[in-house]
Amino acid sequence: MQGSDSSAIPAVILSTLVAICGSVAYGCSVGYSSPVEAGITADLGLSLIEYSVFGSVMTIGAISGSLINGKIADLTG
């Protein structure tokens, strides 16, 4: 290995950990709303359709966030 190759390893490890943390946070957020569906609908007075929108807001945010962050990553290089 050359000296310049070994300096990229910490950056690769850090970017991998950031990607993993994002996946874990998303999974925890989605998993939170599943077991408490009855409580959320009762407390907030939501119908099934309104709860479905409530549950899909996170997916919509993930899609828009990835598009925006991808463009920012391209610009900053």
Image (cartoon, helix red, strand yellow):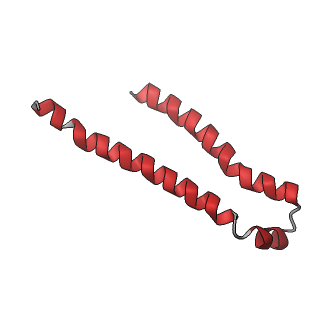
Extreme residue toward the left, this view: 2
Query: If the image is split into quadrants, where does the N terminus sit?
Result: top left
Question: Residue 31 location in percent, x, y?
Answer: 62, 62
Asked if residue 73 is positioned above or below residue 48 in the image, the reply reads above
Tell me if 31 is positioned left or right of 14 in this view: right
Question: Residue 18 location in percent, x, y?
Answer: 41, 48
What's the residue at 52%, 36% (across, down)? Answer: 69
What count of labels does the image hold?
A: 0
Question: Residue 30 location in percent, x, y?
Answer: 63, 58
Query: If the image is split into quadrants, where does the C terminus sit?
Result: top left
Asked if residue 20 is positioned above or below residue 66 in the image, the reply reads below
Quarter occupied by residue 50: bottom right
Tell me if 4 is positioned left or right of 66 in this view: left
Asked if residue 45 is positioned above or below residue 12 in the image, the reply reads below
Tell me if 66 is positioned left or right of 33 in this view: left
What's the residue at 79%, 71% (across, down)? Answer: 38
What's the residue at 10%, 30% (across, down)? Answer: 2
Question: Residue 70 location in percent, x, y?
Answer: 51, 32
What's the residue at 37%, 45% (across, down)? Answer: 16
Tell me if 66 is positioned left or right of 52 in this view: left
